[in-house]
Amino acid sequence: MELADNYKKLIAEVPESVTIVAVSKFKPVEMILELYNGTGHRDYGESRAQELENKASQLPKDIRWHFIGHLQTNKIKSILPYVSLIHSVDSFKLLQEINKAASQNTIIVKVLLQFYIATEETKYGFSLAEVIQIIESEEFKEFNNIEVSGVMGMASYTDDESLIRKEFNTLHEYFQILKERYFSNSESFKEISMGMSGDYQLAIEEGSSMLRIGSLIFGGR
């Protein structure tokens, strides 16, 4: 019951209003099932389309799968039957292709807009100006099969807590700007996905509504 114990320690420190996405990437289905059965946890995060597809086909159907990795356009169709929320929409082309695939399947796909808030060049994401340009475009207004549910960001990999806090604060500000200007009437635009095992407490303090937690639950790779 080690996973259940890890989970219980974590939820004792996380407000009920904050969703924990258990990052199950690279973990076997047996571990996911152990957490599922031992705690009742239902939100799991995967970063590779084929791995998500394989696991979703083997595991209980009430699991809410979150795609949290860099998504290639040619992998969209394979995850649509399973995915509950795509956290990592980082280009207009990806938005276009998700809407197109969702339209063909007559479904609405929930997505988060990923912002580049870190100092590392390896991270993906939009700038605020890019997102505003997209939202104000005529094409975006015709996207009937996408539901923008909020924002996502990854802080720098550093021990500098003041920098991490600043980056999380920036993402929260972006969320507020978009909410006030464009999504004030949208009940679904409510998520701020930020914070992982090493910085989740700072993320909660800066307004995160959704944490992506892997090693604190499942242990290291």
Image: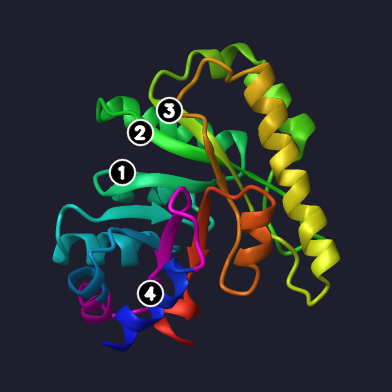
Which residue appears at 76% of the width and 34% of the height?
A: 128
User: Which type of secondary structure does the marked residue at label 1 adopt?
Assistant: loop
Alpha-carbon neighbours of circle 3 within 10 Å: few (<14), some, or many (≥20)? many
Magenta segment: 13-34
Label 4 with label 3: CB-CB less than 8 Å: no
Q: Name the residue under label 1.
A: 80
Mark 2–mark 3 Cα distance, whole angstroms, equals 10 Å
In front of the other: 7 or 214: 7
Name the N-terminal-most of marks 3 and 1.
1
Q: Mark 3 points at which residue?
A: 146
Pinpoint residue 25: horizontal percent, then vertical percent: 40, 71
Alpha-carbon neighbours of circle 2 within 10 Å: few (<14), some, or many (≥20)? some
User: Which type of secondary structure does the marked residue at label 4 adopt?
Assistant: helix
Q: Name the residue under label 4.
A: 7
Q: Mark 3 is on which residue type?
A: Ile
Name the N-terminal-most of marks 2 and 3.
2
Mark 4 vs mark 1: give the one in front.
4
Pinpoint residue 139: horizontal percent, then vertical percent: 56, 16
Q: Name the residue under label 2.
A: 101
Mark 2–mark 1 Cα distance, whole angstroms, equals 8 Å
Alpha-carbon neighbours of circle 4 within 10 Å: few (<14), some, or many (≥20)? many
Pinpoint residue 61: horizontal percent, then vertical percent: 15, 54
Residue 187, numbered circle: none
Label 3 with label 1: CB-CB less than 8 Å: no
